[in-house]
Amino acid sequence: MTDRAATGGATSTVDELLAHLATPAGRADPYPAYAALREAGPVVRGQDGRVAVLSYADCLSVVRDSRFAHHTQESMGEALGPEWKAHLGLRQMFGSLLTLNPPDHTRLRGLVAGAFTARRVQALRPAVEAQVQALLDAMEDQAVDGDVDFVDAFAFPLPVNVIGELLGVPTADRPQFRAWVRDATQVLEVLTPRVVVKADIAARRIRDQLEALVVERRRRPADDLLTALVQAEQEGVRLSEDELLTTAALLFSAGFETTVGLLGNGLAALDAHPGERARLLADPALTGPAVEELLRYDSPVQTVRRTVAADVEIGGVTVGPGTQVTAYVGAANRDPARFDLPDRLLLDRPGNAPLSFGGGIHFCLGAALARLEAQVAFPALLRRFPGLRVVGPVARRDSLTLRNLTSMRVRLAG
């Protein structure tokens, strides 16, 4: 395994390329760095001992193999110090369903998985279609000289209203979660004192809102997921108050943050590929494969982190217990060994199976719901505004783990 990779006629070390991915420029467009890293091998090791996995086959192994585990509570203490649990922002993220290992993960996932079965998600289609039409109407009303911010007007409100209805979060309370969730999830990217403080504040505000809703659901049950979680706790399922609130916060946050990325990244990709966009507009049967290709082309989740629990060989590299491994699923989705012409957007790409929703026991619970929202949204959007185009400015969240837009100005009619 070499530690040097060619890029644009120059040669950069693996550490230089990994460092570049941690810069604003690298996070804004990580794909050239991914390609350069892949030149050094499907699996590369930095000088600090951390391992980066770039190939599709090896990333698939990382997300499926139980030897690649999330941080244990003990390893979190070693990495962040013994007082890490005193920070609500860290506890709410790293002590949640997102990062737990069995048996706690198995128990908590079993409580909520029933709400996201394919049958139940498909039953939501009429509600999603109605929400999409309402937002398209609102986009016309909000447009100034034909221009509107697509993220504010559509990409954010659609998933936040869908997951809000599912959980039972009141409509008036949903918009304020946007900034809170952004601050809370930043700990997945970097851990600095400033980031942790902001995450603590955001986590407390999220929890305060949910605590009030839990009190209300105990007094007046409703037909929503939050009531189901409350009743499961009351019926003897071993769900503590902290687990209840942490799980509810995760479901609501994850239920819209990644879908915002799918919708924003997807529309930007279609705008940059007018031929593929015209094909989608002309052929509704292309919708399902198109969403898979948009997920592959510019994934809303770019990295998955694990800690090795036992000796394992991956990509020809032997990795020992305690080693931190990052699976760059954004790179895996453009691996030329798995995808022909990986840097091209091909909406009818055969055999498409992007790793954007992870895999194994941590496969995204809301994957079917996110797909449904995108499958309804993109055709409806293009039919309603066939001349829609991006006119800028475009602002992207300064993050690699969660890749999404914070603003994108579009013109509704050409």
Image (cartoon, rainbow, N blue to C red):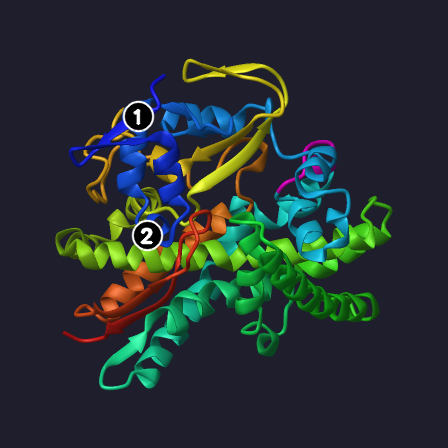
Does residue 35 appear in the picture of this structure? yes
- Give coordinates of residue 15: x percent, y percent: 39, 33
Q: Is residue 139 above or below residue 20?
A: below
Q: Nearer the viewer, mark 1 or mark 2?
A: 1
The residue located at (34%, 43%) in the rendering is 292
Q: CA distance from mark 1 to mark 2?
A: 20 Å
- The residue at which mark 1 appears reads as 4
On residue 25, the disc is 2
Q: Secondary structure at mark 2?
A: helix
> Which of the marked residues, 1 or 2, is nearer the chain's N terminus?
1
Instruction: Provide the residue span drawn in magenta.
Output: 99-106
- Give coordinates of residue 413: x percent, y percent: 18, 76
Q: Is residue 302 above or below residue 185?
A: above
**Quadrant holding the C terminus:** bottom left
Image quarter of residue 215:
bottom right
Mainly helix, strand or loop, the magenta region? Answer: loop
- Callout 1: few (<14), some (14-19), or many (20+) C-alpha neighbours within 10 Å? some
